[in-house]
Amino acid sequence: MIKGMKTGVAAVLGTGLVFSLSFAAAPSVDAAKKLYDSKCASCHGKDGKGNAAMSKAFKVSPAALNLVDEETVAKKDEELLKIIGEGKNKMPAYAKQLKAEEQKLVLQYARGLAEKKTENKMEKK
Ligand code: HEC
């Protein structure tokens, strides 16, 4: 049973697609959403498009807070995880608040929001 659980966790962390398709009801998705909504949504918006009021308050462009635009989607996980862990300009560092797995989980969640948003666009190509 423990072995099975480990495999499940590896699959969840390993593949975002499997994660969002077959584990949709798993508690880990709830956990990711909870983390994202409580720690990230205030600046990046629940939909990942960025909070307009925050972009004004921080004097950063709305694009900087947008996690579902093509520019962010095109970046590598390592690059984005580094920003989440170490921070960047007005983006706070989360290395002390979130474990490495949790940082990956919120990134996967943000990636999932981007997939939802770009679905139509990508079909056109
Ligand atoms: C206090 C506001 C704030 C909070 C809270 C916040 N961020 Fe950010 N985040 C920013 C800002 C501002 C930037 C843009 C930094 C820059 O490029 O100057 C940013 C950038 C990012 C980027 C890089 C995007 C890119 O295109 O390079 C990622 C990824 C990110 N944040 C994820 C997260 C995650 C995940 C959380 C929650 C754990 C979070 N942020 C919480 C303000 C915030």
Image (cartoon, rainbow, N blue to C red):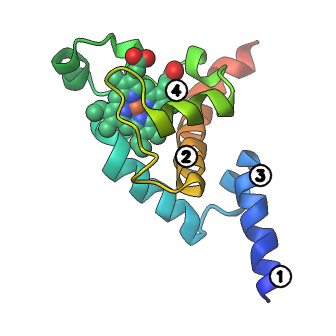
* Mark 2 surroundings within 10 Å by alpha-carbon count, few (fewer than 14), some (14 through 19), many (20 or more): many
* Mark 4 surroundings within 10 Å by alpha-carbon count, few (fewer than 14), some (14 through 19), many (20 or more): many
Label of residue 3 in the image: 1
Disc 3 and disc 2 in contact, CB within 8 angstroms? no
Query: Residue at point 47% right, 34% down?
Result: 86
Quadrant into which the N terminus falls: bottom right
Q: Is residue 121 left or right of residue 7?
A: left
Quadrant into which the C terminus falls: top right
Task: Name which residue type carries label 1.
Answer: Lys
Mark 1 or 4, nearer chain start: 1
**What residue would you read off at disc 3?**
14
Task: Name which residue type carries label 4.
Answer: Val
C-alpha gap between disc 3 and disc 4: 20 Å
C-alpha gap between disc 3 and disc 2: 13 Å
Task: Name which residue type carries label 3.
Answer: Gly
Asked if the beta carbon under badge 4 is closer than 8 A to the nearest atom of ligand 1, the reply is no
Asked if the beta carbon under badge 2 is closer than 8 A to the nearest atom of ligand 1, the reply is yes
C-alpha gap between disc 1 and disc 3: 16 Å
